[in-house]
Image (spheres, rainbow, N blue to C red):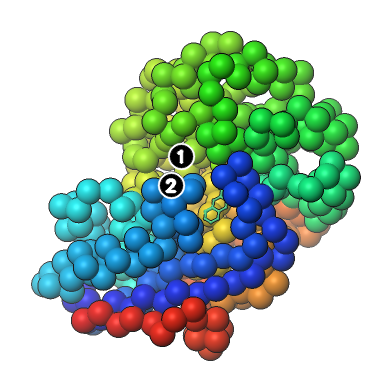
Amino acid sequence: MRIDAIELHRVGMPLVRPFETSFGVQTAREVLLIRVRTDAGDGWGECVAGTEPFYSSEYVDGAAHVIEHYLAPTLLRAPDVTAASVARQLGYVAGHRMAKAALEAAVLDAELRAVGRSFGEYFGATAEWVDCGVSVGIAPSIDELLAEVAGYVAEGYKRIKLKVKPGWDLEPVARVRELLGPDGLLQVDANTAYTLADAEHLKRLDPFDLLLIEQPFDEEDIASHAALAQVIETPVCLDESILSAAIAVDAIERGATSIVNIKAGRVGGYLEALRVHDICRELSVPVWCGGMLETGIGRAANVALAALPGFTLPGDTSASGRYFADDLAEPFVLGSGEHAGQLRVPTGPGTGVEVDEAFVAARALSPHRTLR
Ligand SMILES: CC(=O)N[C@@H](Cc1ccc2ccccc2c1)C(=O)O
Ligand SMILES: [Mg+2]
């Protein structure tokens, strides 16, 4: 395809409730959306970087800058661009995986819409519905936490994930385990808030039968995660550390992770996410789909990814309403009856969602940029 223009849209969307993690409190999502205009039609992609460089080194302003000054000019100059060629064409730029992933996803959306294929079909999805978990922030009090969790359980979520940090871990986990009962699926995510010195403390989570403890230590400290895994029963799962299939293999082989959280934006795109899925499957390592408070664009693509056979654990592919009262596309709503706690895999061309351009324009934080 020939790319004739690349548009950058910055959209501000309030969260239905504050979302607190060990790295800060989020009350709104500022998201960078990409629309590519090609000779085969348009496509939308979503950059998952946060407003600030706290979850990772990427952030909205930085992603917009690197797209405007390096990544978009390269694709606009190229005589032919396909989703399969984007990573190689942009490889001369170091890092900026979330920015690259947004462009690749937009190109893939345009490419697949042009031939009437869905992301799910292209990825090799084997399910029509995916089990959904929910990520629960650090709360002002235990009672408020329990009320929020009870609400999600009532909505049918298949798995509860609690954000934890030093000072907010053992008691919240104990109380939520009590609320869920012994069979409820429960896991925690520290977003790098601990160090190996906390190993004995973290071992005190073992009695609560957690599915996993996600990214307890610094994203670059693979060795400490391997050391922790020798000390605790709870399986260790990496998120921030896993930037590529190669790093996933390294972490698995070193015993640093026995379950992998896959996020397409974090690893540089959905095509690399497929490679992470495939290698984890070969190594018999379960994977699940992480979430970055996506709008319907990224949420649709994540649900399609989560429909692959290696995604055997409920992901953070929650309903749109977990984060947003209104979304830029038809909201994802949990199924009912036999599909309680599940989201349906979109079957339309590309991501399968139609972006409400009036919504995007109404919530634009600045005039959109058109790069040619
Ligand atoms: C659903 C979930 O817990 N996501 C991330 C943390 C996170 C939380 C809030 C974010 C806000 C803006 C950008 C990225 C963000 C990532 C995680 O799994 O670690
Ligand atoms: Mg995480």
Q: Which mark is residue 240?
A: 1
24 sits left or right of 75 in the view: right
Q: Quadrant of ligand 2?
A: top right
* Dot 1: element: loop
Q: Position of residue 278 (x, y in %)?
A: 39, 38
Q: Position of residue 271 (x, y in %)?
A: 34, 51
Q: In front: 298, or 142? A: 142
Q: Amino acid at mark 1?
A: Glu
Tag 1 near tag 2, CB within 8 Å: yes
Is residue 150 visible in the rendered image? The answer is: no
Which residue does the image show at 34% across and 61% down from the upper left?
62
Q: Amino acid at mark 2?
A: Ser
The answer to whether mark 1 is within 8 Å of ligand 2 is: yes
Q: Could you say which quadrant of the image residue 160 lies in? A: top right
* 134 lies above or below 5: above
The residue singled out by tag 2 in the image is 56
Q: Position of residue 367 (x, y in %)?
A: 41, 85
Which residue does the image show at 57% across and 45% down from the upper left?
23
Is residue 192 visible in the rendered image? The answer is: yes
* 5 lies above or below 268: below
For this orientation, the residue located farthest to the top is 231
